[in-house]
Amino acid sequence: MLMTKTAFEIEADAARNMLRLRYIGRVTAADLEPCVAQLKTLVPKLRAGFTVLTDLTALDSMELECVGHLTAMMDLCGASGVGTAVRVIPDPGKDIGLNILSIIHYRGVRILTCKTLTEAEEALRA
């Protein structure tokens, strides 16, 4: 039986003006190429001030070569008017450097880091 690897899920929720990203398993740079392509089609569906919710709950690891794709996605979101970035990082060991990258690529963007998706949803409602 052939199994397909899903390294990410991405969706735009226009009603909530939110982009949701979820990384799954062991993510490689090759895995992120289609993620960047999908992001380019989804961001125009959102209004300036949108929120990016990134969930690392199911992430096992991400290779260092992913940095170029991550920064490209952050730059695209920044140029499109992202207002808030919410990260779900249940284990500090799974932090893939998003906070450091944000210093350069998300200037002026409100950043929230939560341990659970429930905590993130509550923070967004507040």
Image (cartoon, rainbow, N blue to C red):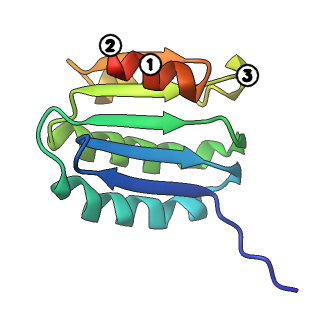
Would you say the residues marked 3 and 1 are in contact, meaning their CB atoms lie under 8 Å apart? no
Q: Examine the rendered structure and indicate whether residue 9 appears above or below residue 96.
A: below
Determine the residue located farthest toward the top in the rendered image: 126
Question: In the drawing, does residue 38 fall left or right of residue 29?
Answer: left
Identify the element where label 1 is drawn.
helix
Give the mark, 3 or 2, whose residue is nearer the N terminus: 3
Residue highlighted by disc 1? 122
Which amino acid type is marked by label 1?
Glu
**Residues at badges 3 and 2 in contact (C-beta under 8 Å)?**
no
**Which is nearer the eye, 99 or 24?**
24
Looking at the picture, tell me which residue is in the foreground, 108 or 90. 90
Identify the residue at the far right of this view. Answer: 1
Q: Name the residue under label 2.
A: 126
Residue at the image point whose x is 69% and y is 41% from the top: 59
For the point 34% across and 57% down, the residue is: 39
Circle 3 residue? 93
In which quarter of the view is residue 19 placed? top left
Check the picture and name the quadrant holding the C terminus. top left
- Label drawn at residue 22: none
Amino acid at circle 2: Ala
Task: Please report whichever mark, 3 or 1, sits nearer to the chain's N-terminal start.
Answer: 3
Dividing the picture into quadrants, the one containing residue 78 is top left
Q: Nearer the viewer, residue 92 or 55?
A: 55
Q: How far apart are marks 2 and 1 (CA)?
A: 6 Å
Query: Callout 3: few (<14), some (14-19), or many (20+) C-alpha neighbours within 10 Å?
Result: few
Q: For the point 36% across and 22% down, which residue is it?
A: 124
Q: How many labels does the image show?
A: 3
